[in-house]
Image (spheres, helix red, strand yellow):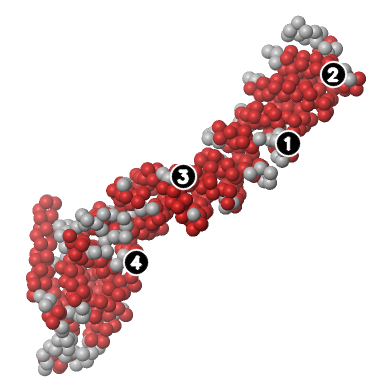
Amino acid sequence: MSVTISNVPDPLPPAVTKLLIDKLYEKRKTAALDVEKIIKDNLSSGNHPEIEKIVKYLSNNYVLSQNQNNKKGGLIGLAACAIALGKEAVKYRSDLVPSVLACFSDPDSRVRYYACESLYNIVKVLRGNVLIYFNEIFDGLCKLCCDTDLNVRNGAELLDRLLKDTVTENSSNERFDIIVFMQLLRERIYAKNSFVRQFLVSWLKVLDTEPNINIVFHISDLLDGLFQILDDSNSEIKRMCESLLGDFLKEISNPQMKSKYELMVNIILIHCGNTNELSRIINSKLWALIENLSQEKKEETKTLINKIAVDKLIETLSRFTITPSETNTVTTTIESLRWFLHLVNKQPELILSQINSFFAILIAFLSDSSKEAVELDLKILAVISSNTFLIDTNNQNENLKANFAKYNNYFLMFMTELLDLFRKDQNLRFEKGSSMIRNLCILLNPEDIFRMFSEILSKEKDSEFAISMVDILNSILLTSCECYDLRNSLKDFNTKESFSLFVCLYKTWCHNPIAAIALCLLSQNYEHAFNLVNLLGDIEITLNLLITIDKLVQLIESSIFTYLRLHLLQVEQNQYLVRALYGLLMVLPQSDAFFSLKHRLDCVPNYYNKISNSTEIKLPSSSDRSKIDFKELLEHFVKVQERHKFFKKQNKILSK
């Protein structure tokens, strides 16, 4: 039986042809053995024209036929020809390979599978000589690796392994062109299919192990796509990609890689929203490389940093302040802020033109759930608020010029916005407010922070918020190690600066009566503390106020007020101190705090006898201290408390 598509007669015997197009694989396999024998016989006799005729006929009239059985017979027949030809097969590769590749896209899955099997045998014979068709084979495998048929995928996988071996065997010669391969990868690296991604990463992994192929030099072409692959839902693919990038990280410190840093930095910045942990490692590695480069070639680094996509960073940071927190990993937020802190410190001129956009975003980030992210954010805002930051100070607020010379207008904005944030978010205020302010006291001058907060809060109309904030600030002032020097300055109370600070804080501390009393006790203004305690009788004694007194009693028993407890031994000089503490005792119900304070006062030696036979002997006072108008301060306290009463009445009326 002769099978012809053209007018050319079939060069194979009819018996072989009949078996070659049979539906049964075993019969086609028998025919393939006959074809192999025919080719070997012609090869031994030197009849190359006949061999060429058979190969061409199988290729054109069988493999490219419309009949599925003919295709299957042609595929196994061409494989038999290649096996029989051995080293001579290279002369016929133009007829052996292209037609088989055409069957990779056949609608019949069995044809696609047999095409993989056929090409596997052909490649096994041709080895490096098949690489002139590498692009076409790679493209075909890229499609077959995600085939819907499992057998086809398995066949493609076997062929893929053989092709990888062939490439690595020929990596040292010109048969494999890495430039051409990278073009293929760039076109496919953004594929969404998990099988394709696995296929691509496996190729990169194999080539990266080859010493003759410098695949990492092309990392800037791959990094963008690899970051996207890191987000794949398949854990095995993610593991492979992480492993590959981990290997790349070990290699990018090569001096030859410096020319690629610019593109790599931009890609890292664009992908600072990547949710994979490895992105943080890559960022850190690149950071170190850029810093090292900075020491060697400062001008080059400046040019490099100037090209960073600042707009993209704004976009990324903005997205994280809007998107629900569960979609933003801690790593993402932290890396974004680290980049920004680096820019603020190293290249502030890049930020100036868009400082207002950044500032609003940075304020919003203060509510982030990550402690590290908030600390980074505070560092950035602290730098921006300082006069060392490149901001024109000609239009500086007059109050800032006079009292806060170290800072620019953004310091006032920062403090105002932070308080506004605390006002809007009670959870943030009570859970993180104290730690945030303490961090600020490390980054900036604590006295300046307290003065600025005090000035802003002195105008506060929301009495409940003012009371709450003063309570937080007072607790920080009295207990935190960050405020040690500030606390000692107020305790010693012997300089113009300490007098000025006391008055500044006092006017705001009046929002919270117990905080004001604590401030007077700290600064040893015991008489004024006693006067304030006497006024507690005119103030509504709420549960919150009693809790605040309880806290103060605990503080009196702490090491912070050791000096105050020792002053109790000097009754003649400190009668107002004793009276103030007894006054607090009278306000307290008989609680633990009551008995704690009572036991302490019971230790005062002969208090009643000494107080009846002596007059108050005040602490030595300087002329500057005597300039403080305590009467005016007392009147201010009364006015503030009257204002609180008024607002409470108004709120009750409105609530009805």
Residue 442 numbered tag? 4
Q: Residue furthest right?
A: 45
Proximity of marks 2 and 1: CB atoms separated by less than 8 Å: no
Residue type, mark 3 in image: Asn
Q: Earlier in the sequence, mark 3 or mark 1?
A: 1
In percent of width and height, residue 345 lies at 38, 57
Other-residue count near label 1 (Cα within 10 Å), few / some / many at <14 / 14–19 / ≥20: many
Query: Which three-letter amino acid code belongs to the residue tagged 4?
Result: Ile
Is residue 469 shown to the viewer in this render?
yes
CA distance for labels 1 and 4: 62 Å
Determine the CA span between mark 4 and mark 2. 88 Å
Foreground label between 3 and 4: 3
**Lower position in the chain sequence, tag 2 or tag 1:** 2
| Kind of residue sitting beneath label 2 | His
Q: Which mark is residue 586?
A: none
- Mark 3 → mark 1, Cα distance in angstroms: 36 Å
* Residue placed under numbered mark 1 in the picture: 166
Residue placed most toward the observer, 509 or 353:
353
Q: Earlier in the sequence, mark 4 or mark 2?
A: 2
- N-terminal label among 3 and 4: 3
Q: Quadrant of residue 90?
A: top right
The residue labelled by disc 2 is 48
Name the spot of residue 96 as percent of width and height, x first. Answer: 75, 22
Q: Is residue 487 above or below residue 23?
A: below
Query: Label 1 sits on what residue type?
Result: Thr
